[in-house]
Image (cartoon, rainbow, N blue to C red):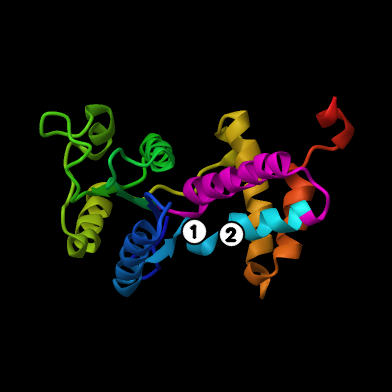
């Protein structure tokens, strides 16, 4: 368990499919960083899908197949970050419907007992004035509607719900263990100096971990 003078790492989950969504998520991450938290923001701190996919296609992988195992890599990396590296999560619920990936990540964080808060200032996903109860039930039916409130709300959530010691991977379900193991290897490769700009190296790690062993079986 971390002591009060150590940075708490926060997973930022939310929609990332257009410029305004990415800008909002970056604003949330920057606010948390300015408040003393360490932050994992998937589109900034992980891989850039398009660039790695281009390398894989240049290596004669069929584009749909390369995209499939690259998605497997992204899944493993994000699961590793959420399960092992991050102690808490901030969930951006904005959008016509909440982002599907973020919903999955929130469910994982909730099941793992990690402090979880949500931000929403978008009314489009409301059902008779309320968000789907299966979503907001994970945040005790409360969310905040101002970005500036996020650090203080997260601090309260952390104080109310003690941070847990690092999980024992061996106690996790086998499929989660596999994702965490692969995600850890990929993350360690990404942490090497200059690695995030080295898409050739990233593509090689992705191939080693996730590409099918026999391409011929894919063409049958």
Q: Which numbered disc, 2 or 1, marks the residue that appears first in the sequence?
A: 1
Q: Residue 127, image x and y in percent?
A: 17, 29
Q: Residue 131, image x and y in percent?
A: 20, 34
Question: Does any portion of residue 76 appear in the rendered image?
Answer: yes
Q: Residue 202, image x and y in percent?
A: 71, 60
In the image, is 64 to the left or to the right of 84? right
Q: Residue 144, image x and y in percent?
A: 17, 51
Which image quadrant for residue 8? bottom left
Q: Which residue is mark 2?
A: 48
Label 1 secondary element:
helix
User: What residue is rendered at 25% in x and 48% in y?
Assistant: 118
**Nearer-the-camera pick, 152 or 6:** 152
Label 2 secondary element:
loop
Secondary structure predominantly adopted by residues drawn in magenta: helix
Q: Are marks 2 and 1 in contact (CB under 8 Å)?
A: yes
Q: Which residue is mark 1?
A: 43
- Range shown magenta: 58-87
């Amino acid at each position: 368990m971390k002591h009060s003078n150590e940075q708490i790492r926060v997973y930022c989950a939310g929609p990332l499919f257009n410029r305004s969504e990415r800008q909002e998520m970056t604003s949330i991450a920057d606010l948390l960083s300015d408040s003393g938290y360490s932050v994992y923001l998937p589109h900034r701190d992980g891989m850039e899908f398009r660039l790695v996919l281009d390398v894989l296609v240049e290596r004669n992988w069929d584009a749909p197949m390369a995209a499939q195992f690259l998605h497997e890599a992204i899944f493993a990396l994000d699961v590793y970050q959420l399960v092992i590296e991050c102690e808490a999560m901030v969930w951006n619920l904005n959008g016509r419907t909440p982002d599907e990936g973020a919903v999955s990540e929130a469910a994982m964080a909730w099941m793992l007992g990690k402090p979880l808060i949500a931000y929403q200032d978008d009314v489009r996903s409301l059902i008779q004035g309320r968000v789907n109860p299966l979503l907001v039930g994970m945040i005790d039916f409360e969310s905040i509607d101002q970005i500036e409130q996020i650090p203080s709300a997260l601090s309260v959530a952390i104080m109310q719900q003690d941070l847990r010691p690092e999980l024992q991977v061996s106690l996790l379900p086998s499929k989660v263990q596999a994702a965490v193991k692969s995600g850890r290897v990929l993350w360690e490769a990404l942490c090497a100096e200059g690695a995030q700009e080295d898409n050739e190296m990233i593509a090689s790690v992705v191939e080693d971990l996730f590409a099918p062993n026999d391409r011929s079986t894919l063409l049958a």
